[in-house]
Image: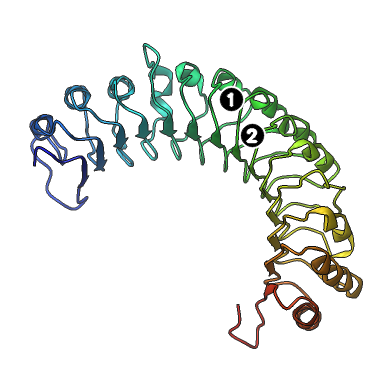
Amino acid sequence: MTNVEELTLCINPDARWNESGCGLSNKDLGTLGKLKMLRSLSIDRASKLDKTGARFLRELPLTSLDLTCNENLSADTANLLFQIPSLVSLDLSCCWLRDKVKHLKPGSLPKIAQLNLAANDLYTLEFLNKFTTLEYLNLRNNRLCDNALIDLKRLSNLKYLSLSYNLIPSKELCHIAELPLESLELEKNSISDEGLVFIGKLASLQMLNLSKNRIIGTGLAQLSNLLKLRSLDLSHNQITGLPNLASLVNLERLDLSKTKIQGESLATLETLQSLKFLGLNGNVLTKKGCTQLVNLAKQLPSLKLLSLKNCEPVSLVKKCKKMLEEKCPALQVITKDPDSEED
């Protein structure tokens, strides 16, 4: 067992706890010290990992540590975990850090590159300004809003950032506009068109998710500066039209599902010669829009998948699909007809 490099310890929530009140005792964690080759450790619901246990973990050559759902993790214990010398990836999602956030003090500069803090009810990120080696940061499903992102400005190596399912307004995006981000997830926030001017400065961006925000389309031209963009999700917004995005020559995936786009405004997409997927799920088609959609598909040789699930009216969707299959036989068109089992 001394040559073990990866270990997962799953604690049954219905099992009897030991005298200390947790599934794993410090003695149990101390035993792990014999695993001198251990690089990856996952302890699911250890419940009461304390400072002593954290000190045992610091003696291991860990590069990856997953403590998902350890809801009783204290700030002092977390601070010790931040200082594991070899640690590259740390998952503290669902650890309920909200009431402990003011006491999170990493001390010397941590060397962690990947940090998952999703679902912790966080409202401030002040403790993160020392994590300058971070490349991946997941802050999904917290309570971040006004003045919450200012402490991310120093994360000069950050490439992936998820801020989905928070309360972030447009003005907050100015704090991340200079970061070298390649992937940015902003699903379900309070971003309006005014915030797109800051996103347009992220020249390295390859993936952008703006689904479920307050975008109507007047600021979309700001995204024309994102020359490396490959995936763009604008679904579930009130967008009625699209600007000329001809500069997005690398865009392969575009999702416009559940928007106000009916098809007539799709002509501006003819310049997206790298586009492979177009999502229009849940939109309303018109006869003119259907004709425009067919013409668009003929102009996009790379387009392989067109999704029209739950579009209306159903009769017109069926006709549109038939026309597309005739004119563009290499294109896969996905619909969802109430009278069939077709996808």
Q: Quadrant of residue 330?
A: bottom right
From the image, tell me which residue sits under label 1: 148
Scheme by which the image is coloured: rainbow
The location of residue 331, given as percent across then percent down, is: 70, 72
Do callouts 1 and 2 mark residues in contact (Cβ within 8 Å)?
yes
Tag of residue 292: none
Is residue 60 depicted above or below 343 in this figure?
above
Which amino acid type is shown beneath numbered disc 1? Ala
Binning the other alpha carbons within 10 Å of mark 1 as few (below 14), some (14 to 19) or many (20 upward) gives some
Q: Nearer the viewer, residue 118 or 276?
A: 276
The location of residue 106, given as percent across then percent down, is: 38, 17
Looking at the image, can residue 311 be seen? yes
Direction from residue 82 to residue 338 in the image, left or right: right
From the image, tell me which residue sits under label 2: 168
Is residue 90 depicted above or below 186 in this figure?
above
The location of residue 189, given as percent across then percent down, is: 64, 41
Q: In which quadrant of the rendered image does the C terminus lie?
A: bottom right
Binning the other alpha carbons within 10 Å of mark 2 as few (below 14), some (14 to 19) or many (20 upward) gives many
Q: Residue furthest front?
A: 301
Residue found at x 87% / y 48% = 244
Q: Nearer the viewer, residue 313 or 111?
A: 111
SS at mark 1? loop
Looking at the image, can residue 240 be seen? no
SS at mark 2? loop
Q: Nearer the viewer, residue 196 or 237?
A: 196
Q: Nearer the viewer, residue 303 or 70?
A: 303
Q: In which quadrant of the rendered image does the N terminus lie?
A: top left
Which amino acid type is shown beneath numbered disc 2? Ile
Q: Residue furthest bottom?
A: 339
